[in-house]
Image: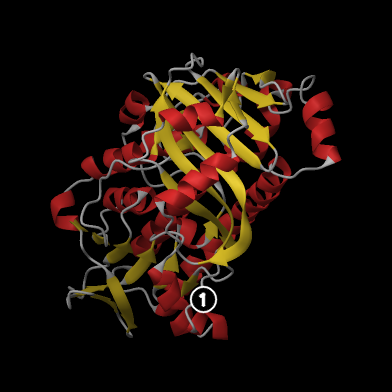
């Protein structure tokens, strides 16, 4: 590594790692992305919800039209409850958000998000390394060394761990920081209490396209939408017992799980047994959905991002959004640090920047995590209170769309991050953004 160059090593080429790579590229900060898989782009993954303030982040780096082009049009949300599969509520929440902020919700397959970010990354062939499994990190006075399984070493100024819920970067950082006996032993701080199936099936059932269906039955929740004649869905159900670490499920286990949901309504007139019978089992995946919130976000020249520090189930659709906004906040700190202190900021300066990044994001991330933690337990719990709420309150009150969704707009969306150093005009709606980049009106 050149002594006059601030160089960032990003571990993980998921959406968060690739977005921060774009952010660093816009700041003219050299970087390399290390991905342990043989390919960055794959064709598996659930649908993710790109909220308006996250669409704004994509627009700032020139990817709004690309994202819109692969998004799934949704105009309404319908909740399905009860013994007959009837629709109890219909919400136009998404339309209100578009009017409030100038950007729509863009539901997109995770694989498409990765593909867009990767294929548009400048000089990607030189900057992204696949089959690059990290085995250790060495910290030195002026640089950091990342050791790979193949014996090679990458040298840089800092390491950003964007390598997901099972982050190897986090494990190494905790060991180096000697956070606890559990960290030293490599025990994951992420815990799985829920698991589910992510899959798709032909829409032979006549379910309405452009509608997001959410159903609750017994101790499970199912979310799905139809586009292009295909039903994309995800289920969530409580695990028999809480577990840590990775878990792969055999086909027989997935069949047993699916059987337990047979009588849960997915949409009007459609039970899960009907959907499962038409599901492409070769592409279906059963996964644990981890939850956890890490107190330490950085140590020395290592800093963590996204699911490596804050992970929730998919029930509230905010995991990607939370990760990308943390990435933007960190990129702002790094750009400002290099601009003010040059290519070789001290560990002390880095610690100050990392602390500001954590402080700017911890409150919102904790709030989103806590709400998701509570929500998944509410929608999968058998209780008199939940039955009463679902049967007698929700049919009469569209809680999401009250006041044209102003509560969500004011409390969540309008405070979204933006890259402060990237000139940008952007789109605006009835609710003004709290943060604006140079050039925005």
**Residue 247 sits in which quadrant?**
bottom left
**Residue 390 sits in which quadrant?**
top right
Question: Disc count in the image?
Answer: 1
Residue at 80%, 37% in the rendered image: 386
Between 402 and 29, the one lying in front of the other is 402
Tell me residue 385's x, y (percent): 85, 39
Q: Which residue is mark 1?
A: 187
Tell me residue 414's x, y (percent): 59, 36
Up the image or down, 65 lies above or below 318; here it is: above
Between 91 and 262, the one lying in front of the other is 262
Between 328 and 190, the one lying in front of the other is 190
Residue 182 in sight in this render: yes
Residue 426 in sight in this render: no
SS under mark 1: loop
Between 10 and 112, the one lying in front of the other is 112
**Residue 382 sits in which quadrant?**
top right
Mark 1 Cα-neighbour bin, 10 Å: few <14, some 14–19, many ≥20: few
Up the image or down, 140 lies above or below 102; here it is: below
Q: Tell me, what colour scheme is on the image?
A: secondary structure
Residue at 33%, 27% in the rendered image: 70
Quarter placement of the N terminus: bottom left
Residue at 37%, 57% in the rendered image: 335
Up the image or down, 255 lies above or below 201; here it is: below
Tell me residue 95's x, y (percent): 56, 19
As drawn, is 212 to the left or to the right of 144? right
Tell me residue 213's x, y (percent): 57, 26
């Amino acid at each position: 590594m050149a002594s006059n160059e601030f160089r960032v090593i990003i571990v993980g080429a998921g959406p968060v790692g690739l977005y921060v790579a774009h952010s660093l590229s816009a700041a003219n900060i050299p970087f390399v992305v290390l991905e342990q898989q043989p390919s960055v782009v794959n064709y598996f993954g659930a649908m993710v919800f790109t909220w308006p303030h996250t669409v704004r982040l994509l627009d700032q780096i020139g990817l709004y039209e690309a994202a819109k082009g692969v998004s799934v049009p949704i105009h309404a949300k319908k909740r399905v409850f009860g013994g007959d599969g009837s629709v109890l509520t219909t919400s136009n929440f998404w339309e209100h958000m578009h009017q409030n902020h100038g950007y729509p919700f863009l539901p997109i397959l995770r694989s498409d998000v990765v593909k867009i970010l990767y294929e548009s990354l400048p000089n990607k062939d030189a900057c992204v390394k696949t089959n690059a499994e990290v085995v250790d990190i060495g910290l030195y006075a002026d640089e950091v060394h990342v050791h790979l399984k193949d014996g090679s070493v990458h040298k840089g100024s800092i390491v950003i761990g964007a390598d997901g819920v099972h982050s190897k970067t986090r494990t190494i950082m905790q060991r180096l920081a000697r956070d606890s006996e559990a960290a030293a032993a490599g025990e994951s701080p992420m815990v799985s209490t829920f698991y589910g199936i992510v899959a798709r099936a032909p829409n032979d059932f006549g379910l309405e396209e452009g509608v997001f269906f959410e159903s609750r039955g017994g101790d499970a929740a199912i979310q799905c939408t139809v586009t292009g004649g295909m039903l994309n869905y995800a289920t969530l159900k409580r695990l028999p017992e809480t577990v840590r670490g990775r878990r792969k499920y055999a086909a027989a286990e997935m069949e047993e799980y699916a059987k337990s949901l047979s009588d849960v309504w997915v949409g009007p007139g459609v039970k899960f047994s009907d959907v499962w019978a038409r599901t492409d089992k070769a592409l279906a995946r059963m996964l644990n959905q981890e939850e956890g919130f890490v107190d330490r976000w950085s140590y020395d020249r290592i800093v963590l991002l996204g699911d490596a520090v804050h992970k929730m189930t998919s029930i509230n659709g905010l995991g990607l959004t939370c990760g990308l906004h943390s990435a933007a906040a960190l990129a702002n700190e790094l750009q400002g640090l290099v601009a003010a202190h040059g290519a070789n900021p001290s560990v002390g300066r880095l610690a100050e920047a990392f602390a500001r990044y954590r402080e700017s994001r911890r409150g919102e991330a904790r709030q989103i995590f806590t709400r998701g933690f509570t929500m998944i337990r509410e929608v999968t719990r058998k209780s008199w209170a939940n039955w009463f709420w679902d049967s007698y309150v929700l049919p009469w009150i569209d809680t999401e769309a009250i006041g044209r969704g102003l509560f969500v707009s004011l409390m969540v969306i309008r405070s979204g991050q933006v890259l402060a150093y990237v000139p940008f005009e952007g789109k605006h709606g009835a609710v003004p953004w709290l943060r604006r980049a140079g050039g925005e009106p």
